[in-house]
Amino acid sequence: MTISINAAFDSGNIVVESVDGTAARLSIRKDRESDFYQWFHFRVACAVGDELQLAITGLAGSAYPDGWPGYAACASTDRENWFRLDTEYADGTLTIRHTAESPLLWVAYFAPYSMERHHDLVASVAECEGVTHRCLGTSLEGQPIDCLEMGTGPVQVWLYARQHPGESMAEWWMEGALEKLVDPADPHARSLRQKCRLHIVPNMNPDGSRRGHLRTNYAGVNLNREWHDPSAERSPEVLCVLGAMDETGVDWAMDVHGDEAIPAVFLAGFEGIPSLKDEQMSKFLAFQAALARNSPDFQIELGYEQSAPGQANLTMSTTQLAERFGAVSMTLEMPFKDNRDLPDPVAGWSPERSKLLAHACLQTLDQML
């Protein structure tokens, strides 16, 4: 029996170069109007007991080739529970091996977060007491940019995710954050809702998410390089979110992401902005230290190189919001690989750990305020 491979579904991405029995040679389709590629998500139809060998080729030219060494592909037989597969990388080819235990196997760069699940999440949270739903605008393909708002306090908090659509762990984090915030019994959530007005955008790039992009929207634009001058033609997703932020102001903000190469959870800040204030930076560093105490999954050793004074890239949301509003803003990064701290050989970094990290972040914010 010859296996068959398909990716014609929400967030699907793979090109079938050839199939020979239970072996396949594959490649990844580039983001539309872009040279970025790294995200994959496809289904394998096979027979139980098949010795699958799936070779994804051409990865030396991918967006982040350093992301492949030490990486293990994610898989599921029911699209609910995800585990890691036997994976090796050499000479630009990722080879995935698995003995099939089910007639269908879904394989992905990380556990996907579908647009259907997004709509289920928005619908369920919007029905909760004290929650307001706003559509801030629409994407280039007309999908809504959903914003869920709650809380009666004066501190303006913005949480937003999936500027880069392939970083699906970011919306798993959002699911965890929203579940905590609307739990009437959760003391940190109750405290935050008294102290803050929370504005939560679970998915800033629905077009890229549905199309199976790694990093860009329908126009091939990296939204996290548009915050200095967003436009309706290139980046309406940023334009509408930044416009809403201008209406409310921003005191605290978190932009949620995933990192391909670094096997750790870490924060990036705004140390290079021209108008940097000592109090602003001290609050960021205090949050970082408190999060490290609250979550063993978070660390401060690994991360990005800091910007030199006055040299921050203001096209990015974290630095733009810190400069524009004097906000304590930050970029949260989670790994595609396993977390170097507390590794899990079965699941690696996972949706469940992403959701629990959101709980720790909100607990930390409550403590800071």
Image (cartoon, rainbow, N blue to C red):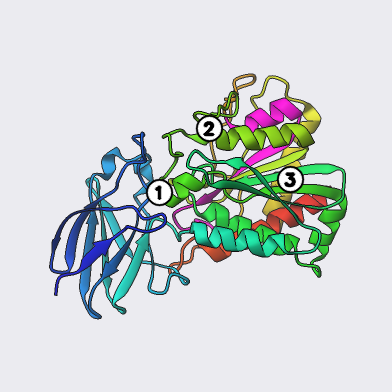
Residue located beneath label 2 in the image: 235
Q: Is residue 264 left or right of residue 9?
A: right
- Name which residue type carries label 2: Ser
The residue identified by callout 1 is 211
Q: Name which residue type carries label 1.
A: Arg
Image depth: mark 1 or mark 3 in front? 1
Residue farthest toward the left in the current orientation of the protein: 20
What secondary structure is found at the residue carrying circle 1? Answer: helix
Q: Nearer the viewer, residue 90 or 93?
A: 93
Packing grade of label 3 (10 A; few <14, some 14-19, many >=20) is: many
Image quadrant where residue 315 sits: top right
Q: Which residues are magenta?
A: 316-341
- Badge 1 density bin: few <14, some 14–19, many ≥20, Cα 10 Å: many
Q: Which residue is mark 3?
A: 287
Name the amino acid type tagged 3. Phe
Sequence-wise, the earlier of marks 2 and 1 is 1
